[in-house]
Image (cartoon, rainbow, N blue to C red):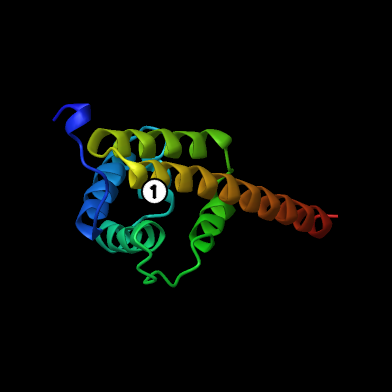
Amino acid sequence: MQEGDMADIANRGDIRRLVHTFYGRVRQDSELAPLFNDVAQVNWQPHLNVMTTFWSALLLRSGRYRRNALAPHLRLYGLVAYRTSHMQRWLTLFDLSVDERFQGPLAEKAKHWARGIARNMEIQITKATASQEVCNDRTNR
């Protein structure tokens, strides 16, 4: 399909395809795969379903996502050091996945939301890990 022939994200099925494409890349990525597969030990099928629901809530306003999206990331970065490159790589793979399959206002909105989510997560993870380091310093005195 040529770029001009691509449709916009229109329904949950489209979001499911985007999520599966994106996480297919993540699972093979030399930087992100170890975080997801080895450290977080993601159970992929339930995760893909949750992420489809998450993105449907954002893009289609389904209102079905009812979880704390930050909590699993805080747990992950309690186990390994956070690196800005993790979020940059996540965004690169997400944008590639959107651009490979979709074109239009919702596709652009998905990329915009992803950048905002990444920025917010980075702030929250940085705060949490800095706070944990302070607690550890006090404990080790």
- Residue at 39% x, 41% y: name it: 108
Query: Is 23 in front, or is 66?
Result: 66
Query: Which x, y percent locates residue 30?
Result: 37, 32
Query: Which x, y percent locates residue 83?
Result: 57, 37
Secondary structure type for disc 1: helix
User: Is 138 positioned to the left or the right of 114 in the image?
Assistant: right
Give the residue number, with chain letter if any, for mark 1: 36
Query: Which x, y percent locates residue 81?
Result: 59, 43
Count numbered badges in the picture. 1
- Residue at 37% x, 40% y: name it: 94
- Residue at 44% x, 38% y: name it: 91
- Which residue is situated farthest in the left direction here? 1
Q: Is residue 96 above or below residue 47?
A: above
- Which residue is situated farthest in the top direction here? 2
Q: Amino acid at mark 1?
A: Phe
Query: Is 3 in front, or is 91?
Result: 3
User: Is 97 positioned to the left or the right of 54 in the image?
Assistant: left
- Image quadrant containing the N terminus: top left
- Image quadrant containing the C terminus: bottom right
Q: Is residue 118 above or below residue 30?
A: below
- Residue at 20% x, 36% y: name it: 6
Q: Is residue 88 above or below residue 13?
A: above
Q: How many residues crowd around disc 1 within 10 Å: few (fewer than 14), some, or many (20 or more)?
A: some
Q: Is residue 65 above or below residue 13?
A: below
Query: Which x, y percent locates residue 45?
Result: 24, 60
User: Is 62 positioned to the left or the right of 141 in the image?
Assistant: left
